[in-house]
């Protein structure tokens, strides 16, 4: 009996500790281990920070000074050694193998906070965690009158993967240097450390190459269009081509330095041999197709036929794999890029290369005969292998999308697997390094809610699906998987506010998938923390998507052929209210409790989600014609 009593007490204490942690601590990504104790530590008005020697500490100290001076108004004093320090930053004298290169220990006690790490990166991530332990007002832009207290806690934390990335496409739409920096800032808050910069595509060449100035004087601009990208009317010849922009090499250096100060590496991408219309429009001699001198940079009009096998191009947006000028061009481009980016890899694209124009080219046919190439995939493989040698000659490692496996992969190429995980598994079996970035889980251009609520693209990706991402699927050698990343393509993303909306909160899910232990993942618990970070984003005036609150519609037919609608919630604990009479429902309307039969004369269904008495979701306007179109 005594043992049962003790067991019950232990369970109650565990539950109490968990509920306290749940109510006070909402860290993303979830640390490896958190032990919360009773009480808090209130920061003093004069915040003394012990920084050690300060060699290499500048980025961490800048973060502290910037955040605390902006939001709290406290006086910050940095000292190499201080017995009364409110915050002690300690680099270990001997390497602690538990936390590795990027991990840290954080201990908040009644008399101050200590962060210990093997490296400055670990200290930086420890400070980011400290900021998340403070009230949400720490993210604000004005001094807030709040109690600046930290829960008494011990944290051990380190990442699961070294490659924790976000890709940002600045080619479909141009984003300014300042906007790119803000995107990197938000990444760093969540311990993401790899910024994949997609710098070239059919719609714009965004990086200054001094050897080929027309890449930016011509290739960086198109005609401004708004609406549904991909369905635009082709621009008229006299429409101004002044929409776009590019980064000078000085801009690039500035962004690289900015990222380094936040412990973020930048992976540049030049997408070839497909997706190269901006380059071809600038230098038509790069094309294998006669008449390329009439080509212009794409503005969002149709360019490929996605309904046919091989997605044939309507204009030749590929580089000529049989032309020596192509390789001379790439040698100079890669050479200049290699000098700008210290990261050891350069991404050279390789995806979605339409080959219908190659099939018609006499030069390509001659190349195939000379090199004994049997298929167009082998032609692309020939191109990729030559390009890999160029990249390696500049002291860099070659990376491409998983299409570079087709026709035979080069000896040292690293593969970024986007068409699911199959390409990554295949590459790893061949002994190649892999970064997992599958559409299934981490394509941030996909719709987050029902398609009646989002800019229309061809697929959907809910938050809870992103949270299922595991960069190491069954059947792959984990040692060859460097990590994972999410990709934001920007066909339908016209501005930085929409870029933020598309990235967050799915970026939170990504961060947890690549940092936190897989065994600790729990979506419902994760979402309670997400909502706390929504509050932080409100303070910081960063946009995010509330799409997880929107219900999921499933449509079928009753035996009498009337429409049947089933609604489910991604988030637990919500109620759904609905109407079919064209009015706007609130919590006094019918509450959804089971499958609904659509009234035969109804033309519109409206639904809204509530938590208790408060509306929490958006009003969803669902045309009945749209529901009918979904019946299989």
Image (cartoon, rainbow, N blue to C red):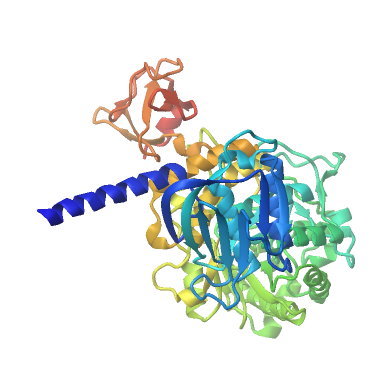
- The residue closer to the viewer here, 475 or 23, is 23
Image position, residue 24 (x, y; %): 46, 43
Horizontal side, residue 13 vs residue 333: left or right: left
> Does residue 135 sit above or below 277 in this rendering?
above
**Residue 562 seen from this side:** no
Image position, residue 267 (x, y; %): 68, 65
Position of the C terminus, as image quadrant, is: top left
Give the residue displayed 62% in from the left and 72% down from the top.
Answer: 376
Q: In which quarter of the image is residue 239?
A: top right
- The residue closer to the viewer here, 438 or 101, is 101
> Does residue 329 sit above or below 145 in this rendering?
below
Horizontal side, residue 456 vs residue 152: left or right: right
Give the residue displayed 87% in from the left and 39% down from the top.
Answer: 238
- The residue closer to the viewer here, 277 or 126, is 126
Give the residue displayed 70% in from the left and 75% down from the top.
Answer: 365
> Does residue 150 sit above or below 419 in this rendering?
above
Image position, residue 482 (x, y; %): 55, 71
Give the residue displayed 83% in from the left and 70% down from the top.
Answer: 336
Image position, residue 185 (x, y; %): 67, 51
**Residue 205 seen from this side:** yes
Q: Quadrant of residue 262?
A: bottom right
Q: In which quarter of the image is residue 88?
A: bottom right
User: Seen from this angle, which residue lies furthest left?
Assistant: 1
Horizontal side, residue 532 vs residue 609: left or right: right
Q: How many marks?
A: 0
Horizontal side, residue 623 vs residue 308: left or right: left
């Amino acid at each position: 009996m005594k043992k049962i009593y003790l067991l019950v007490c232990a369970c109650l204490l565990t539950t109490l500790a968990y509920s306290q942690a749940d109510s006070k601590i909402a860290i993303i990504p979830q640390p490896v281990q958190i032990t919360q104790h009773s009480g808090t530590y209130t920061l003093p008005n004069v915040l003394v920070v012990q920084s050690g020697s300060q060699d290499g500490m500048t980025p961490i100290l800048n973060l502290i000074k910037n955040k605390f001076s902006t939001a709290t108004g406290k006086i910050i004093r940095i000292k190499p050694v201080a017995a009364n320090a409110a915050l002690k930053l300690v680099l270990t004298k001997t390497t602690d193998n538990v936390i590795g290169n990027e991990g840290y220990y954080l201990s908040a006690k009644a008399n101050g906070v200590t962060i210990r790490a093997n490296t400055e990166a670990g200290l930086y991530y420890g400070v980011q965690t400290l900021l998340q332990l403070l009230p949400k007002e720490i993210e604000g832009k004005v001094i807030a009158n709040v109690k600046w207290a930290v829960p008494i806690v011990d944290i051990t934390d380190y990442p699961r993967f070294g490659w924790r990335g976000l890709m940002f496409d600045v080619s479909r739409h141009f984003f300014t240097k300042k906007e790119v920096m803000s995107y990197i800032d938000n990444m760093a808050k969540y311990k993401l450390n790899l910024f994949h910069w997609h710098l070239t595509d059919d719609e714009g060449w965004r990086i200054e190459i001094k050897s080929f100035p027309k890449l930016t004087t011509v290739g960086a601009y198109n005609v401004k269009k708004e609406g549904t990208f991909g369905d635009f009317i082709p621009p008229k010849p006299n429409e101004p081509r002044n929409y776009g922009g590019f980064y000078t090499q000085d801009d690039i250096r500035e962004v690289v330095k900015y990222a380094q100060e936040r412990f973020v590496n930048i992976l540049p991408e030049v997408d070839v041999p497909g997706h190269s219309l901006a380059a071809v429009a600038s230098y038509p001699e790069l094309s294998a197709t006669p008449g390329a001198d009439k080509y212009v940079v794409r503005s969002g009009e149709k360019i490929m036929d996605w309904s046919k096998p091989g997605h044939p191009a309507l204009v030749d947006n590929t580089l000529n794999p049989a032309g020596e000028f192509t390789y001379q061009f790439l040698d100079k481009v890669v050479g200049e890029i290699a000098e700008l980016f210290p990261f050891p890899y350069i991404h050279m694209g390789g995806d979605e290369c339409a080959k219908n124009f190659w099939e018609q080219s006499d030069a390509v046919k001659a190349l195939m005969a000379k090199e004994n190439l049997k298929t167009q995939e082998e032609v692309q493989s020939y191109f990729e292998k030559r390009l890999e040698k160029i990249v390696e000659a500049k002291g860099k490692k070659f990376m491409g999308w998983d299409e570079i496996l087709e026709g035979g992969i080069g000896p040292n190429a690293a593969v970024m697997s986007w068409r699911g995980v199959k390409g990554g598994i295949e590459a790893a079996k061949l002994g190649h390094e892999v970064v997992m970035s599958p559409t299934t889980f981490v394509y941030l251009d996909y719709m987050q809610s029902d398609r009646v609520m989002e800019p229309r693209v061809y697929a959907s990706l809910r938050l809870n699906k992103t949270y299922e991402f595991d960069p190491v699927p069954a059947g792959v050698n984990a040692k060859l998987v460097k990590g994972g990343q999410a990709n934001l393509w920007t066909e339908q993303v016209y501005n930085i506010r929409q870029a933020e909306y598309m990235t967050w909160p799915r970026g939170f899910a990504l961060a947890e998938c690549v940092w936190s232990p897989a065994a600790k993942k729990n979506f419902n618990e994760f979402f309670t923390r997400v909502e706390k970070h929504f509050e932080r984003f409100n303070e910081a005036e960063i946009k995010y998507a509330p799409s997880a609150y929107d219900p999921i519609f499933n449509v079928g037919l009753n035996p009498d052929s009337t429409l049947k609608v089933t609604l489910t919630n991604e988030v637990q604990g919500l109620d759904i209210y609905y109407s079919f009479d064209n009015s706007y429902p609130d919590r006094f309307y019918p509450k959804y409790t089971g499958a609904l039969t659509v009234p035969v004369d109804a033309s519109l269904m409206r639904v809204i989600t509530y938590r208790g008495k408060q509306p929490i979701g958006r009003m969803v306007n669902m045309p009945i014609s749209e529901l009918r179109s979904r019946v299989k």
